Image: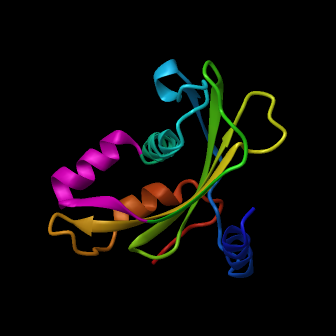
Amino acid sequence: MSQTTANKAQLSESKSVQQSKTYHFPVQIYYEDTDFSGVVYHPNFLKYFERAREHVIGANSLASLWDEHDLGFAVYRTDMLCHDGVEFADIIDVRTKFYLESKYRTVWIQEIWRPNGKKPAVTAQIEMVCMNKKRQLSPMPQQLIARLGEAFAEQVTF
């Protein structure tokens, strides 16, 4: 773990941030995902993380957010570390937790695990912000906060 990632993890723990339950999203690795050596080309990990986040929030919720509220999410910051190669034909488990940092920002802690892995192959912390169609920072609607809050043991409010 890099010093930056370790510092962020310690900061999250020291702030006693309430994280969501862990979500699991399987991804089949196809030949097209790999480079010449049969190992996943690193930008594809960002695609797998994106799919897993969409799975947590829900495609219908994201479409409604855009169509009814003129709001969407944008990546604000990404910190990704590749610890081990992921190979052609693997079926990986993308593990996702998140917390609501504010009414504007969500922070996603994501890991990619290979079959029978003893540690994550890839780890990332991805910060997302809610923005309107004019690309201005906007608060998430209360119904979305409530929907995301269902992933927590205690109620989350802003």
Observer able to see residue 141: no
Locate residue 64, reporting x and y percent.
24, 49
Residue 54 coordinates in the image, percent (x, y)? 42, 44
Quadrant into which the C terminus falls: bottom left
Say whether residue 23 is magenta.
no
Q: Is residue 3 above or below residue 75?
A: below
**Left or right of 86, for residue 42:** left
Image quadrant where one finds the N terminus: bottom right
Which residue shows up at 22% across the image and 74% down it?
Answer: 136
Residue 142 position, x and y percent, is 36, 67
Q: Nearer the viewer, residue 99 or 123?
A: 123
Question: Residue 71 magenta-drawn?
Answer: yes
In which quadrant of the rendered view does residue 6 lie?
bottom right
- Please give the range of residues in magenta: 58-76
Quarter assignment of residue 119:
top right
Residue 29, relative to residue 106: is it above or below? above
Image side of residue 30 versus residue 128, left or right: right
| Colouring style | rainbow
The picture places residue 157, in percent across and down from the top left corner, at 49, 74
Quarter assignment of residue 94: top right
Residue lying at the far right of the rendered structure: 118
Of all residues shown, which one is farthest toward the front?
36
Can residue 104 be seen here? The reply is yes
Q: Out of 117 and 60, give the one closest to the viewer.
A: 117
Q: How many marks?
A: 0
Give the left or right position of residue 98, taking residue 21 as reference: left
Query: Which residue is found at the position 28% from the left and 75% from the top?
Result: 137
